[in-house]
Structures are given as C-alpha cells and as structure tokens.
Amino acid sequence: MVIIDTDPGLDDAVAVLFALQSGRFEVLGLTTVAGNLGIDVTTRNAGRLLALLDRGDIPAIAGAGAPLARPGIDEADIHGDDGLGGVLLPEGAPPFPGFAPSWIADRLREAPAGSIDILALGPLTNIALMLRDHADAAARIGRLIVMGGVVRDKGNAGPHSEFNFACDPEATAMVLAAGLDVTIVPLDVTRKVRADREYLAALNGKSTAATAAAELIAAYFKDGRESRPLHDPCVMLYAVAPELFNTTKQSFSVDISHGADAGAVLPNAGGFPVSVLMDVDATGALDLLGQGLSTSHP
Ligand code: BDR
Ligand code: CA
C-alpha cells in the first residue's frame, strides 16, 4: 500500500498517472503539499488526476500550505500558473476533509506496521509535521522514498541544492534525522531518465493516462529543448523495480542556512545514514514507465 505525497506539478502528475494506471500500486490517497505551486492549486490538480482516471474512490487530502520556517519558492515558470502547463483535465471532487499529516498518521496506525510506503514527490513539510505531531505513527512507515537532493551533479535551486529540499530545508533535516527507512532519489539519477519527442509520440493514444502524460511532458518542453528529465516518476519506478537502480548507503547533513545552498545535502560521515540512488538503467526505466502508463484495464 502507498500514500503519495505530492505537489502537482508536471512530473508529479506523470508519476501519479503511472501509479494509478500501472496496477502496480494500491494507492490509499494523494496528500498534497505546497511546492511547485500553492496548496490550493496542487490539491485541485491532485483531484483532477483522480477524475481523469475515474478514481473518485481515492481521496485527495490537503496538507501544508507553506514550509515549516520560511516562505516557499515559486516554480510557476516551469509548471505553468495552473501547475499542469495548461493541459486541461476534468475537475475533480473537492478535497477530502482533514489535514494531510493527520490523515497519513491515521492510515499508518490502522494498518500493520511497515505495510504502507510513502512516496514523497514534493517538499517534505507534511512528513516532518507528521514526525513532529504523530511520532508513534511515523515509526510505522514502511519505505519512505523521496525525490530530492543532489549529490555530485549541480543543483536546480542553488549551486548544490535541489528544489524539493531547498523549499523546506528544516523539514528535510527532520526527516533525515528521524531514523526511518529513507531512500533518496536525487537529481543525479532523475536527470538521466529523459523523455524526448519520440518517446511522447509512442505514448500518445495508448491509454487515457499515457495520452495525458505525453501532453504533460510536452508542456514541460521549453526553449527548444530536446528532452526533459522525469524526476518524480523515478520514485514510482524505484518502488516497483529497485533492480533498475544502483543504490548506495551514504550519510548526510542538511544545509539549513538561508544561503544560496539552503537545503543542500552534504556528505558527512557523522550525518544521517540513508539509501541514495546514484545510477539508473535509463532505458529500462523509460520502458517500464511507458508500459505502466499504457496498461489497459479490463
Ligand atoms: C523536483 O522539483 C519539482 O519541481 C519537481 O516536481 C520535482 O519534484 C525536482 O527538483
Ligand atoms: Ca514534485
């Protein structure tokens, strides 16, 4: 069973569509966080993705509207004002009542310990709030797989910092320090899993999810670029096919300054040990993503 914590967001949307369409996940809910856009927009988009695939049985629950201790970072120039690059999706149901960190904690408490994985595709604010307010429940998480950080490559927020971690460095530090089973999926890997126009053409028409994913990725192409990285879908791909990735164990501390590299993860022998993906079979990952998005259900 999984809970997807997300800030859709174009690549979030593709990741969610894969999770819903592939049949490889039992999705308990989409919890939303402010990140790529404000919380109202990311929550509305979560509902739209569920509506597109007629999954009104899955709730979308709104979470944190701002990072723990600082203002958010505006990414509208990448994801568009609507977070979906102008791709029109049907309107979804209103969000499920409640607050994401509490809702996640309730699900963790009622399921066997270790049976729910959390797939975190945005800033870690909701997870940190759950750790702070519901530590008993947080200890019951199975795997916590997080898109965030950059290890050797250059950053996309600061010179060495990645957007999700840079949005909420304090939350990132809390989550890494919590001693959970955390796997980080950094830019070093996600930048290798790239869709080009040929890939989009192959997806188009295969299923409602595949066609929408192709449109969403196309909206992500700008400035004549030849291909785009599929950051968040790598979390889903690792969850179902860890053999496609090379995983290392490393210890990090987190830059919680207000400098240009806030949120950067710093290799530090005395830091917090986590699993980190450092390489990927990109062809295998793209094939699996395409197959999952194109799966037809009877
Ligand atoms: C991450 O930041 C967001 O813009 C993407 O959705 C992804 O989660 C990549 O740095
Ligand atoms: Ca995201």
Image (cartoon, rainbow, N blue to C red):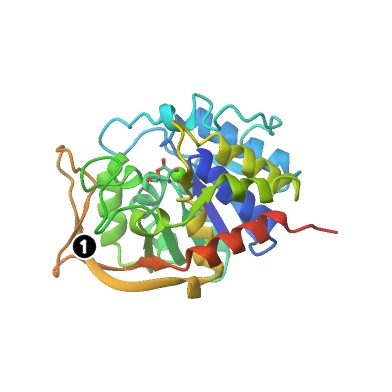
Quarter where residue 267 is shown? bottom left
Percent coordinates x, y for residue 221 in the rendering: 50, 36
Is the C-beta of the residue carrying label 1 under 8 Å from the nearest atom of ligand 1?
A: no
145 up-or-down from 73: above or below: below
Q: Quadrant of ligand 2?
A: top left
Q: Is residue 97 visible?
A: no
Between 267 and 199, the one nearer to me in the picture:
199
List x then y, in percent, for residue 9: 50, 38
Q: Residue furthest right?
A: 298
Along the viewing direction, whichever of 182 and 139 lies nearer the viewer? 182
Q: Residue at x 48, y 58 (%)?
A: 234
Percent across and percent down for residue 126 are 41, 46
Furthest residue in direction bottom, as rendered: 243
What's the residue type where badge 1 is placed? Phe
State left or right for residue 56 relative to residue 217. Answer: right
Q: Residue at point 48% right, 45% down?
A: 227
Q: Which residue is mark 1?
A: 252
**Foreground residue, 149 or 145?**
149
Placement of the N terminus among the 4 image quadrants: bottom right
Regarding residue 235, the answer to whether it shows in the image is: yes
- 85 displayed left or right of 66: right
Res 248 quadrant in image: bottom left
Location of the C terminus (image quadrant): bottom right
Crowding at dot 1, Cα within 10 Å, few <14 / some 14-19 / many 20+, comes out as many
Q: Which residue is found at the position 51% from the left and 31% from the top?
A: 83
